[in-house]
Structures are given as structure tokens and as C-alpha cells.
Image (cartoon, rainbow, N blue to C red):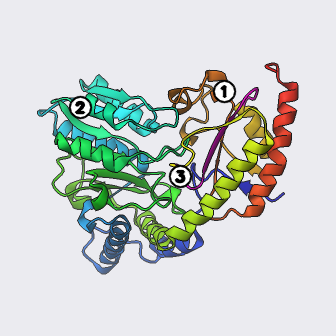
Amino acid sequence: MDRIYLDNAATTPVDKRVLEAMLPYYSDVFGNPSSLYSYGQEAKKAIEEAREKVAKALGADSDEIYFTSGGSESDNWALKGVAYALKDKGNHIITTEIEHHAVLNTCRYLEKEGFKVTYLPVDEYGLVKPEDLKKAITDKTILVSIMFANNEIGTIEPIEELVKIAHEKNVYFHTDAVQAVGNVPIDVKKLDVDLLSLSAHKIYGPKGVGALYIKKGVKIHSLIQGGTQERNRRAGTENVPGIVGLGEAMELITKNLDSHINKLTFLRDKLINGILEKIPYARLNGHPTKRLPGNVNVSFEFIDGESLILNLDMAGICASSGSACTSGSLEPSHVLLAIGLPRELARGSLRLTIGKENTEEDIDKVLEVLPQIIKRLRSISQIV
């Protein structure tokens, strides 16, 4: 059975060109980048070339890019690093109710460490209201962390406007852009963000590597203590193949970004319109237009999301009911509850995220199979 993969928000397949770029650094150029001999210096050069590629893709300077093990570490570093660096100035952090758990759980950890956290609500589409941020900032606020685009419902936040509000009060602004990088244009200078997190495996790169953009002049403590790697800010022997893969993935995805966005948007809209036309009692979650180009999140009344995912899998379609990081949880999505969905409807949610390998034929197949599965599940449901 040919499988249709529609869970690209969870992870993407590694682009063959990315893999080819990485392979020499597993065996041929295997030196430690901290070593002075040629093997080590070749590896160090590869890291710096990758740093240039990531910086160019973001509109940053190369010395503002720091490599990490992925989005979760980048988020942890941004929040904990700023919190501890500025604790003498204040102890208040602002985030939202719909953040990824890498941010939410880090904030909960910091609350145990004596920091105060405000969790901003969102509207029915998942948008943060700028006036809510304005009201929440106090003279003790040191950091605002608001995601660029939501990983479950795809809503894109008004980051530029929110950054201006924070900066008017001299407060740092961090954005988790793990889902946005490679799906929307990002220029950190234009956005004026102070910190930005990204991950390679969401953009057809390898798992286990990411980056944190730290604007020049930002005060931040290190998260990992040890050697002098990453200009004394992030200790540990570098993951050279992974970093090379991230650099290659960033260069490839930004080179054809406009056509990538156009393709995904076309397939997304076809899928959304088809689902809403063919399936009664279906609801689109997230903003209808201010959303990621490949994100489709719908809720179905009288349906259990887990049963839906398993039935789709049996039909050869890979999908999810929300964030991959909480797929083992029986609780409904915190994001869907935050936008006001009743728990029963939130449990009947389906996330289909489109990637560059998907075709119009894939979408046609889903629109053929999904209504049949929904009809069958509803016929045996105890809720109906």
C-alpha cells in the first residue's frame, strides 16, 4: 500500500540532498572541531559555513546564530537564559496559553524557581490580542515569549506588532519559530525579535539539531556548562553532520520559498474546502487565512480522534490529532481548549499537515477516504 504522509508538522523526511551533504562528516571528515590539526579544522569550517547559511536565511549576522540539539533546547535556553541573566532587574515573564510544551513546561519550571508567569489568552482563532500584552507588562517584566505560528492549529501571530509593544517597555522578545521557519518568510531584523528558536527536522533536515538566534547585546546565561564551544555559550562537542544538514536544509527551503508556499497553500485550501463540503458537523480550527500554508486542523462532532487516526492509518494515511509531543496523552489539546472548543469536540480533532512531497492526488485520496471513515465511526459511536 502506498502511504500518504500528512504529519509534516511532527517531522519531515530528510531531503536526499541534505543527507548527501551530511554523509562525509560521519566518516571522512570526522575530526573534533576543537582540534587544531586539519581534520578538526575542516569540521570547524563546515560548521561556520552552515552558520552562514542559517544566518542568511534569517537575515541575521552569522555571529548571532548558535547551534543546539533542537527546538526544545533553544526554547529552554531562551527562557532560562534570559530569566537568570535578568533576575536582578525583574522576575516576570509573559507567554500564551497555546505555546508548545517546550515553552509552557519551562515557564512552569521557572515559576518553581520564583519567577512569575502570565499566560495570555487567545481569541477563537488562536490570535493573541496586542492590547492584552500591553496590559500584562509591568515594571518587573523581563521577557515575552510568543510563538510565531501555532504547531496545532497553524495560526500565525502578529509578531511585529507584539515585538513593538514589548520593546516600548524595554522588554526582550523571544519567538518559537519552529513551525514557521521554511513555511513563511522570516527576517529577524525586520521583525526585530531578540531571540528566535528553530529546528532542522521540520524543514527536511535531520532530527536532533536546531538553532537559537540571539540578537547582539542580549543578556543571556548559558544553559549547558562545559567547554568553550559556540563562542563560550553552548558547551559540548558539536554535532557536525547535523549542523551541516541544518545549514543545507535552510539554504534549500529558502531558495524556493515562494513556490513552496504557493503549492502548500493551494493543497491546504483544497483539503479544507473539500472536508467542510463533504463532511457534516465539521469545524475548521485556527484562523481561516492567517495560518501556515500546509496546516489543516478540523474537529468532527461525534468522533473520537484516536479512532480516527487509527482508521486513517489502516487506509494508508498518516495524520495526527495534535502535537506529536503529547500524542500519548488522553487529555484534549490545550490549544483547542484555549480557543474555546468544548472538551468533546476537542477530542474529535484531526491535524493534517502538508509537505513538499505531497501531491494533489494525495489530497483527492484523503477526500475520498475521510468522509467514509467519519460516516462509519459515527454509525457506531455511542454519542450519536
Relative to 288, say whether 237 is above or below: below
Q: Could you give the CA–CA distance between mark 3 and mark 2, rounded to whole angstroms?
A: 28 Å
> Disc 3 residue type?
Leu
Where's residue 241, x and y in %?
A: 45, 67
Do tag 2 and tag 1 residues touch (Cβ < 8 Å)? Answer: no
- Which secondary structure lies at badge 2? loop
The residues colored magenta run 291-304
- Which secondary structure lies at badge 1? helix
Q: Could you give the CA–CA distance between mark 2 and mark 1, rounded to whole angstroms?
A: 34 Å
Query: In the rendered view of the protein, which quadrant contains the N terminus?
Result: bottom right
> Disc 2 residue type?
Ile
Query: How many labels, in total?
Result: 3
Determine the image quadrant of residue 122.
top left
Q: Nearer the viewer, residue 87 or 242?
A: 87
Label 2 crowd bin: few (<14), some (14–19), many (20+), radius 10 Å: many
What residue is shown with label 1? 345
What residue is shown with label 2? 137
Q: Is residue 296 magenta?
A: yes
Label 1 crowd bin: few (<14), some (14–19), many (20+), radius 10 Å: many
What residue is shown with label 3? 292
Relative to 324, say whether 316 is above or below: below
Disc with the residue nearer the chain's start (1 vs 3)? 3
Question: Which residue occupies the extreme bottom position in the image?
Answer: 38
Disc with the residue nearer the chain's start (2 vs 1)? 2
Determine the image quadrant of residue 378.
top right
Which disc is residue 63 wearing? none
What residue lies at 41% left-to-right and 72% top-to-bottom?
Answer: 30
